[in-house]
């Protein structure tokens, strides 16, 4: 491959000549949430490079986050690497020690074979026992001969004996160090309320958490926010899951991963114990990558989407199913890192400048294999108690500014709020602000709310909505339920949107602002499709015209969304 030519703009007006440049493109998109714009950037780049004379090495890969992007990339990369196998530049593109053909190395041991190691002579460092690499690790290894598995693929970690059996509940002691884990803006926020909002909503009902933004003495403001912002939360894995993983690796759970002699490729903070690293730094509920799955299973003979992704298998599932242990290095270097979760703030800073309300639904479901799963962060939040005393639970979090989701400066602009389920969170914040403005005597433009819930027991904030109607913060409200209505007809928010096409078109044409909040893959995509239909029907436009109309609404701040899955 010619790596000297770029795709940047030329100094003159002429297009660059990319003859001799070889290229490959893997695009990122989401067919469920943004079907009409699926992989548009990747496709455009691929076409443009070809137009400028570059040579395509392999067909464009279309990664689909609405399905299984890991498998998409894995399949595309296999094709890409097979093209490069005989290339003279392959060594520049493959990491040291990596097998171009994709063969996986692993350091596993069948649990039932452990008894063979009991009473064995003490191993010397780097000794390979029965073909599996192990090193001597006195006081740390859990095997009878004080040796532990190491990886054939990743650097060996230096472990130090435990100093205590205390597991840190947060990692703020790392702030300001080279191993800082949280964002520099993060604070340790006191939980001053956490409750289920619906009386009969059950375990899948919507919860509301209140956190305070001041310190314990209420003298210092830790964080500030504006209405429409997000609170970014750092979760922890459930203790029972952490315990199960600790039992799989053959080292003391309280052994310390040393801060010195560690390679720069180590992805997590140094100086933590094994248990702390598993608790805070790794998403133990995430499926393993295709390459990690091959390592665990020792074969390529499986369908990643069908056998792993769609069935929500985890590393723990596969290890227990095949009765294996894994080296600490293979686990830490290949598991999915824990990512902070974004939650729409459900309160207005005008009403609550020193408090934030979060709205969440505890994720809990049974996979197609009959395994009960719980969401990592929603489970973490739901276990934060509040007893009304001076002792508080905490969450590590920071405020992420969201300037593209704001109330208009002109209070007379008509507003349309469309939300479903937990999408009520940002709508609650906007409504709370409208209520405060109305109470202060401000004249407000029309405010229409289309809101959907699973059923009547799932509904929340009815009293607040009625109060908003009473004050004039809202002028029209339509609340629907997708199930459980008995003799009444179940309705989705999309049904309401379609039934009110003329009202919505008039709102668009009046220059009103529309807020769309809820799930991206189903709810957001369905509402967007309804918008296209409304614009084409009432605006007498073809699809391309409707697309331009909607794009201009977004560009001009007339359509704002807070969509996520």
Image (spheres, rainbow, N blue to C red):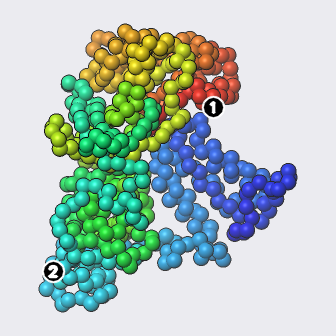
- In the rendered image, the quadrant that contains the N terminus is bottom right
Q: Is residue 120 left or right of residue 465?
A: left
Q: Residue furthest left?
A: 119
In contact (CB < 8 Å): disc 2 and disc 1: no
Depicted 465 relative to depicted 360: above or below: above
- In the rendered image, the quadrant that contains the C terminus is top left
Say which residue appears at 25% left-offset and 27% top-offset: 197
Instruction: Provide residue 470's location: percent of width, then percent of height.
Output: 37, 9
Q: Give 96 or 163, whichever is nearer the viewer.
A: 163
Instruction: Provide residue 298's location: percent of width, then percent of height.
Output: 37, 69
Instruction: Provide residue 259's location: percent of width, then percent of height.
Output: 35, 73
Say which residue appears at 82% left-offset and 59% top-offset: 17
Mark 2: few/some/many CA within 10 Å (<14, 14-19, 20+):
some
Q: Is residue 201 left or right of residue 360?
A: left
Task: Return the disc, 2 or 1, that comes first in the chain's sequence.
Answer: 2
Q: Give 221 or 128, whichever is nearer the viewer.
A: 221
Mark 1: few/some/many CA within 10 Å (<14, 14-19, 20+):
few
Q: Which mark is residue 144?
A: 2
Q: For residue 169, say whether it is visible.
A: yes
Q: Which mark is residue 350?
A: none
Tell me the mark number nearer the camera, choosing from 2 and 1: 1
């Amino acid at each position: 491959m010619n790596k000297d030519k770029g795709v940047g703009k030329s100094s003159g007006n002429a297009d660059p000549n990319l003859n001799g440049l070889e290229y490959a493109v893997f695009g990122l998109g989401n067919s469920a949430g943004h079907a009409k714009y699926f992989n548009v950037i990747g496709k455009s780049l691929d076409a443009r490079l070809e137009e400028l004379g570059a040579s395509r090495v392999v067909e464009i890969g279309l990664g689909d986050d609405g399905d299984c992007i890991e498998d998409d990339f894995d399949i595309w990369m296999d094709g890409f690497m097979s093209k490069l196998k005989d290339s003279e530049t392959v060594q520049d593109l493959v990491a040291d020690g990596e097998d171009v053909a994709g063969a996986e190395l692993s350091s596993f041991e069948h649990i039932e074979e452990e008894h063979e190691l009991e009473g064995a002579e003490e191993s010397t460092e780097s000794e390979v026992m029965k073909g599996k690499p192990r090193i001597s690790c006195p006081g740390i290894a859990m095997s009878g001969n004080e040796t532990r598995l190491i990886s054939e693929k990743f650097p060996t970690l230096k472990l130090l004996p435990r100093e205590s059996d205390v597991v840190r509940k947060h990692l703020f002691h790392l702030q300001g160090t080279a191993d800082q884990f949280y964002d520099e803006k993060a604070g340790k926020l006191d939980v001053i309320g956490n409750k289920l909002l619906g009386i009969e909503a059950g375990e899948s009902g919507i919860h509301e958490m209140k956190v305070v933004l001041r310190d314990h003495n209420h003298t210092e403001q830790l964080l500030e926010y504006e209405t429409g912002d997000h609170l970014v939360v750092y979760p922890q894995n459930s203790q029972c899951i952490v315990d199960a993983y600790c039992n799989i690796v053959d080292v003391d759970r309280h052994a310390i991963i040393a801060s010195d002699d560690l390679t720069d490729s180590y992805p997590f903070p140094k100086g933590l114990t094994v248990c702390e690293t598993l608790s805070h730094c790794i998403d133990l509920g995430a499926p393993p990558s295709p390459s990690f799955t091959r390592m665990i299973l020792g074969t390529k003979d499986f369908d990643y989407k069908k056998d792993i992704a769609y069935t929500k298998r985890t590393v723990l599932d596969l290890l227990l199913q095949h009765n294996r242990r894994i080296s600490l290095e293979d686990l830490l270097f290949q598991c999915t890192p824990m990512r902070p979760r974004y939650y729409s703030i459900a309160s207005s800073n005008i009403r609550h400048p020193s408090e934030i309300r979060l709205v969440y639904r505890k994720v809990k479901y049974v996979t197609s294999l009959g395994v009960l799963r719980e969401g990592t962060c929603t489970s973490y939040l739901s276990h934060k108690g509040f007893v009304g005393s001076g002792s508080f639970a905490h969450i590590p979090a920071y405020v992420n500014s969201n300037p593209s989701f704001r109330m208009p400066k002109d209070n007379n602009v008509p507003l349309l709020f469309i939300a479903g389920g937990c999408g009520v969170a940002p709508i609650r914040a906007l409504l709370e602000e409208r209520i405060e403005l109305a109470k202060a005597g401000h004249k407000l433009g029309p405010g229409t709310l289309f809101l959907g819930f699973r059923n009547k027991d799932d509904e929340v904030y009815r009293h607040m909505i009625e109060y908003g109607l009473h004050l004039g913060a809202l002028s029209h409200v339509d609340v629907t339920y997708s199930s459980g209505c008995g003799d009444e007809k179940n309705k989705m928010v999309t049904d309401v949107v379609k039934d009110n096409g003329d009202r919505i078109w008039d709102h668009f044409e009046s220059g009103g602002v529309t807020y769309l909040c809820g799930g991206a893959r189903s709810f957001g995509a369905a509402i967007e499709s309804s918008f296209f239909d409304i614009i084409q029907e009432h605006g007498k436009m073809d699809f391309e015209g409707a697309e331009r109309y909607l794009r201009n609404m977004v560009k001009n701040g007339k359509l704002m969304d807070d969509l996520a899955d």
